Amino acid sequence: VEATYGTVSSGLLEAAFGCIGSLLPSLPDHTRLAIVTFNDAVQFYAGGAQLRQFHVPDVQDLCLPLPPEQLLLPLETSRGMFEELVATLPTLFATTKRPDAALGAAQSRASRDAAKHSFELPPGLSADINTTEPSPSASLESLLQLGSFDMPLLGPASTQQATHLQQLNQMQQLQQLQR
């Protein structure tokens, strides 16, 4: 999730975490999840006895601070931690002034780790990213659908969630127009 000054000031960061928070109850317990935020660095989060943030400033040679299985946690045992995380992160980044986004590095690392764990990234994301901008062909709908399933893995489970997603999409479009 992008945590730059632009996403914070426009409300996109809060809307994104609101959407994630509203989707959490509808995800099955066997789902493995990791939340990664990025601005000019990449932040990873891990649970355990205490919720921890790992700040990785070297985006040119991005490495994981922990093994993927310690970052990609099952909801069965970590749902409460993720609920706390999505509620806390908008406040944590509320005063950020960092304008730059390391999106390419975050996507590249996520793609490499996805390949190792036998699941697909949404269309528009790949391991060969040499830019800090998302693929122009990646739409919000394609980013919410993983793989080629009969029904989306991540999709609105209620009209409230669909409304959140529409608001997020509108905010993203307004932000692009302002650039």
Image: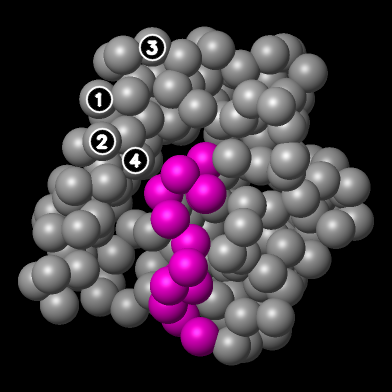
Disc 2 versus disc 3: distance between alpha carbons?
13 Å
Q: Nearer the viewer, residue 21 or 175?
A: 175
Disc 3 versus disc 1: distance between alpha carbons?
9 Å
Q: Earlier in the sequence, mark 2 or mark 3?
A: 3
Which amino acid type is shown beneath numbered disc 4?
A: Ala
Q: Which label was assigned to residue 125?
A: none
Which amino acid type is shown beneath numbered disc 3?
A: Ser
Which amino acid type is shown beneath numbered disc 2?
A: Gln
Q: Position of residue 20 (x, y in %)?
A: 43, 31
The reply to whether residue 24 is visible in this rendering is yes
| Helix, strand or loop at mark 4 | helix
In the picture, the quarter occupied by the C terminus is: bottom left
Disc 4 versus disc 3: distance between alpha carbons?
16 Å
Magenta stretch secondary structure, dominant: loop
**Circle 4/circle 3 CB separation < 8 Å:** no
Please tell me which residue is depicted at 26% across the width and 36% down the height of the picture. 166
> Which residue position holds label 3?
158
Range of magenta residues:
131-144
Please tell me which residue is depicted at 52% across the width and 20% down the height of the picture. 24
Which amino acid type is shown beneath numbered disc 1?
A: Thr
Q: Residue furthest front?
A: 150
Q: In this image, 104 relative to 166: left or right?
A: right
> Which residue position holds label 1?
163
Q: Up-down: is 155 above or below 76? A: below
**Circle 1/circle 2 CB separation < 8 Å:** yes
